Image (tube, rainbow, N blue to C red):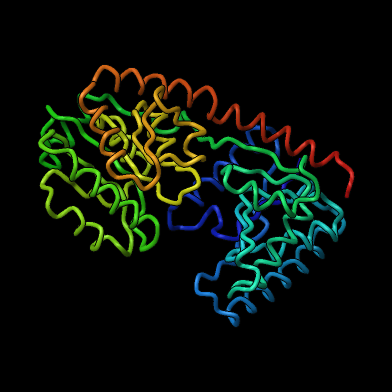
Amino acid sequence: MRVAFYAPLKPPDHPVPSGDRRIARLLIQAMRAGGHTVEVASRLRSRDGDGNPRRQGRIRDAGRRTAARLIARHRHNPPDLWFTYHLYHKAPDWIGPAVADALSIPYVAAEASHAAKQAAGRWRDGHQAAAAAIATARRVLVFDPLDLPGVAGIAATPERLVRMPPFLDTTQHPPPPRAATRTALTREHGLDPAIPWLATIAMMRPDRKRDSYRALAAALARLGDRPWHLLVAGDGSARTEIEGMFNHYNRVRFLGALDARALARLHGAADLAVWPALGEGFSMALLEAQAAGLTVAAGNRQGIAQFVRHGETGLLAPEGDAPALAAAIRALLDDPARRRMMGARGRRRTHDRHGLPAAARTLDAILQDARHEGPT
């Protein structure tokens, strides 16, 4: 079928990489792998991070004008379905519901969230718009289990809420040969190849990402004299502050933002992926690390526990508990055989259950159900 795709937070061809852009691209890839034609319907970014009513009003008006143009353009040849990825009160969908209603096509939303406490806040108009979109959606794809309670109260029926496991294309940029990559990175960054390397991949924003970096520094401080290197891939406005959190370690290397091939090198050379994941839904960085064969030590969030199986493919510590995270890292550092076994198991599990073929089949079934279900 023909699918009109829209990502109000960040379009899939935006020049700045992020997890949102990555997932938007993966959704398009999965739909195309399922035999569907996907067109990006609009690149309008609806996010207002400051709660500015005037800016929100301008975005709303731009969305309505865009919707009117799309309705006129597709009146006589509409797409079969509208698909919106990631909408919430700060980034509502002002376009999709209007277009879907006017053209009498199904509206599907993915990673929608609804927080009742925002109803009277600075984003109340966006909160109402996001709620209205969720209420009209034929299907709402839920990646993070923590989003379920919020959207369940406004979805038309419980059957329209569908759990969608996070996924990735496991064939892209497989890790290069470990020995050669480790030798190269040793030369480039002055590392000791005889000790374990920990990998962290995360943006450096002044929000929960910064909080996670602070928690990671606190956990590493509890490892005593155990030998390790930490390789950090990421950049952002809080980089200087975050680097300062690790100033007392001479074993940390900040690599900056890395492209997909450089990340594959890091995954191929490292021994363990570590991340506290404070306040995160699910981590694509951890899923990618596990797909590359890395064992994971992370905070225990429901979204992450979908693919990191505690005791099987990694160790999960209570969220925000730095001593517990340190204990998990310590246990894996002290047991290389267990670490390698967990990494191999995690790689197989990710390829089998969270790869693109499985996602394409699941997504196709969801879209077909939405298309053939009658309106509310």
Q: Position of residue 215 (x, y in %)?
A: 30, 50
15 sits to left or right of 138: left
167 sits to left or right of 141: left
Image quadrant assignment for residue 133: bottom right
Marks counted in the figure total 0
Between 330 and 103, the residue placed more toward the observer is 330
Q: Position of residue 105 (x, y in %)?
A: 83, 51
Q: Is residue 216 above or below residue 228?
A: below
Q: Is residue 311 above or below residue 318?
A: above
165 sits to left or right of 330: right
Please identify the quadrant where the N terminus is shown: top right
Q: Please name the residue shown 39% across and 24% down the image.
A: 311
Q: Position of residue 335 (x, y in %)?
A: 23, 21
Between 85 and 308, the residue placed more toward the observer is 308
Between 235 and 66, the residue placed more toward the observer is 235
Q: Please name the residue shown 74% across and 54% down the image.
A: 154
Q: Please name the residue shown 46% across and 42% down the image.
A: 301
188 sits to left or right of 102: left
Image quadrant assignment for residue 27: top right
Q: Please name the residue shown 48% across and 22% down the image.
A: 349
Q: Position of residue 275 (x, y in %)?
A: 34, 43
Between 134 and 309, the residue placed more toward the observer is 309
